[in-house]
Image (cartoon, rainbow, N blue to C red):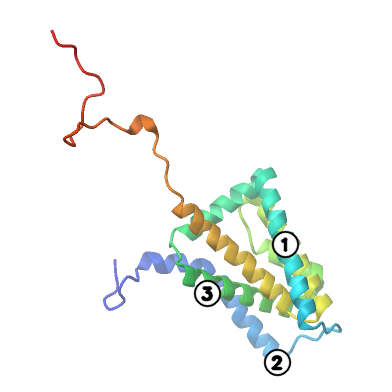
Amino acid sequence: MRFRGYGHLTIDKMRRYLLFAPSLLFGVIGAIWLGFRPLELEAEAGPFTILAVAFLLIAGLLGGAYLLEKTLPSFRYASRMLERAVARFRPSLPLSVGLAAATAVSEELFFRGVLLSLIGVWGQALAFGLLHPATRRGWGYTAFTFVAGLAFGYATVATGSLWAAILAHFIINLQGFLEVQRRRQRPRVVPLSSHRERSPGGTDAPETQSKKA
């Protein structure tokens, strides 16, 4: 079913975008909160320090995710499940960049901008992990997001700014979207047994020929 005047926008596609609605809602709440109660931290790191911390976050978390993907079935299962969920609406590169940025900014505004000052580094990390559930079988992903929440939280405290966490969160999210695109565009290997020999004229030829009498 399509809405008239909305081109290729379908009800099914709108439902798929709801996957990101909670993150965007967190961002609205965080922005409103910080508008009235700005984040106040003692540290005041410069831009180069913030970039260095962001780089360490990216390297550490992506490296950890790579190792978990190879060694922990629970994490691998959750990763595949999330990739299938994202692949359903076939995000283009601009859309992937936009969603990666929107979700990163929104979640950092809420978890590190609001919850960190209310319930501390460990409390916000626990909330961050629990709000990224992946079923009981995918517990490894929830545990990983808890650790990521700790890393983002301590980076925010150490730099006195949300920017290191936002930049790292954005790159990690974008890498996930690009990985989905890469796997979707991977050529499909057709088993040789499925090919049928074709005659020079283009018609299917029998695999065996009867001997002439």
N-terminal of the pair, mark 1 or mark 3, is 1
Q: Quadrant of residue 207?
A: top left
As measured in the structure, the alpha-carbon distance from the residue carrying label 1 to the one carrying label 3 is 22 Å
Badge 3 is on which residue? 98
Question: Label 3: how many residues lie within 10 Å, few (<14), some (14-19) or many (20+)?
Answer: some
Q: In percent of the image, x 66 and y 45: which residue is there? A: 70
Task: Give percent across and percent down for residue 66.
Answer: 67, 52
10 Å crowding of disc 1: few (<14), some (14-19), many (20+): some
Identity of the amino acid at label 3?
A: Gly
| Residue behind mark 1 | 59
Q: Is residue 208 left or right of residue 95?
A: left
- Front residue of this view, candidates 57 and 104: 57
> In the image, is residue 86 above or below residue 75?
below
- Cα distance in 3D space between marks 2 and 1: 34 Å
Q: Hey, what amino acid is under mark 1?
A: Ala
Q: Residue at x 54, y 52 (%)?
A: 81
Q: Are marks 2 and 3 in contact (CB under 8 Å)?
A: no
Give percent across and percent down for residue 186: 46, 50
The picture places residue 177, in percent across and down from the top left corner, at: 54, 62
Q: Callout 2: helix, strand or loop?
A: helix
CB under 8 Å between discs 1 and 3: no
Check the image and report above or below for 1 versus 105.
above
Q: Please identify the residue farthest to the right as the structure is shown.
A: 42
Q: Amino acid at mark 2?
A: Phe
Residue at 46% x, 54% y is: 184
